[in-house]
């Protein structure tokens, strides 16, 4: 992983130090060759909770798209509402943020820190952990 990024299970994670709206956060991750955090299992949720001590509210790569108002991850993977229920409204301008081990709906223009994620790259004969 690049300097200042955390490595976990073959992926790299970076937490911003400043606050921004969801779109600016998405743009920043894209500029880093990454995307906003996508959480697919509790193990990753635990890792992030331990890293942030549950104190840093941060944008996730989760937002409401389409007229049906469905939550969608930025990488188009399936959102598991049973595993990660979102508290709050699912309106057209709703984006997902994490605080502690809960995912909440917020207006996309609200400003929080954000977490970028990308695949780890091996630079030698190594296996991603």
Image (cartoon, rainbow, N blue to C red):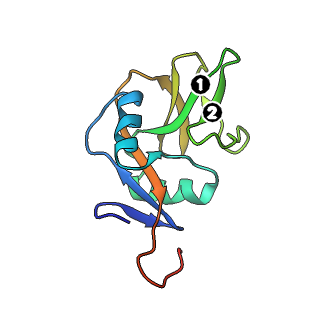
Q: If the image is split into quadrants, where does the N terminus sit?
A: bottom left
Residue at image coords 43%, 49%? 34
Residue under pointer 1: 64
Quadrant position of residue 82: top right
Choose between 36 and 52: the one closer to the eye: 36
> Which callout, 2 or 1, points at the residue further toward the start of the chain?
1
Residue 2 position, x and y percent, is 33, 63
Circle 2 crowding by C-alpha within 10 Å: few under 14, some 14–19, many from 20: many
Is residue 9 shown left or right of residue 71? left
Choose between 67 and 50: the one closer to the eye: 67
- Residue farthest to the right, as pictured: 82
State how far apart marks 2 and 1 are (Cα): 6 Å
- Residue farthest to the left, as pictured: 18
Please report contact status of discs 2 and 1: CB closer than 8 Å, yes or no: yes
Residue 5 position, x and y percent, is 35, 60
Is residue 88 shown left or right of residue 113? right
Residue 80 position, x and y percent, is 71, 42
Q: Is residue 88 above or below residue 128?
A: above
Circle 1 crowding by C-alpha within 10 Å: few under 14, some 14–19, many from 20: many
Residue at image coords 64%, 54%? 41
Q: Is residue 24 above or below residue 76?
A: above
Q: Secondary structure at mark 1?
A: strand
Q: Is residue 105 above or below residue 59?
A: above
How many numbered markers are drawn? 2
Which disc number belongs to residue 40? none
Residue at image coords 43%, 82%? 124
Q: Secondary structure at mark 2?
A: strand
Residue at image coords 38%, 45%? 55
Residue under pointer 2: 72
């Amino acid at each position: 992983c690049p300097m200042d990024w955390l490595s976990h299970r073959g992926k790299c994670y970076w937490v911003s130090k400043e606050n921004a709206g969801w779109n600016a956060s998405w743009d920043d991750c894209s500029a880093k060759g990454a995307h906003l955090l996508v959480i697919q299992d509790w193990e990753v949720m635990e890792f992030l909770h331990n890293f942030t001590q549950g104190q840093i509210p941060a944008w996730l790569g989760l937002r409401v798209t389409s007229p049906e108002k469905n939550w969608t991850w930025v990488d188009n993977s399936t959102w598991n509402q049973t595993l990660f229920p979102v508290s709050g409204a699912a309106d057209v301008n709703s984006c997902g943020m994490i605080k502690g081990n809960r995912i909440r709906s917020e207006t996309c223009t609200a400003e929080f820190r954000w977490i970028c994620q990308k695949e780890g790259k091996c630079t030698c004969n190594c296996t991603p952990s």
